[in-house]
Amino acid sequence: MPIIVEIDVMLAKRKMSVGELAERVGITPANLAVLKNGRAKAVRFTTLAALCEALECQPGDLLRWEPAEAEKAVDAAGAAGG
């Protein structure tokens, strides 16, 4: 999936546990794990806002876009002249 979730990075920077973050945000640790591990198909803006508030960060600190592997392979072939 081209959207990378970097909640772990912010948890480490804030020295906060998953359980503490889940409690502050108002979601279960299991649902936070689904989001944190990149298995979520969607995230509500209210949840994203609560994460940002609890971690004192911006949405871009938690999510980043990365081209899919297939797109990278096509780009690499084109750059190599192939």
Image (cartoon, rainbow, N blue to C red):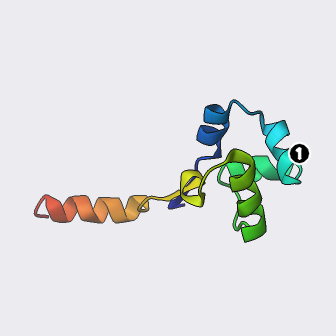
Q: Is residue 69 left or right of residue 57?
A: left
Q: Which residue is mark 1?
A: 23
Q: Is residue 42 left or right of residue 70?
A: right
Residue 27, x across and y down, in percent? 87, 54
Depth order, front residue of 80/29: 29
Position of the N terminus by quadrant: bottom right
Q: Is residue 40 left or right of residue 66?
A: right
| Residue 51 at least partly seen | yes
Residue 82, x across and y down, in percent? 14, 64
Q: Residue at x 69, y 30 (%)?
A: 15
Residue 50, x across and y down, in percent? 77, 58
Q: Residue at x 73, y 54 (%)?
A: 53
Residue 4, x across and y down, in percent? 55, 54
Q: Is residue 61 left or right of residue 35?
A: left
Query: How many labels, in total?
Result: 1
**Mark 1, other Cα within 10 Å: few <14 / some 14–19 / many ≥20:** some
Classify 59 as above or below 23: below
Classify 62 as above or below 12: below
Depth order, front residue of 47/77: 47
Q: Residue at x 72, y 62 (%)?
A: 49
Give the residue at the far left of this rendering.
Answer: 81
What amino acid type is highlighted by mark number 1? Glu
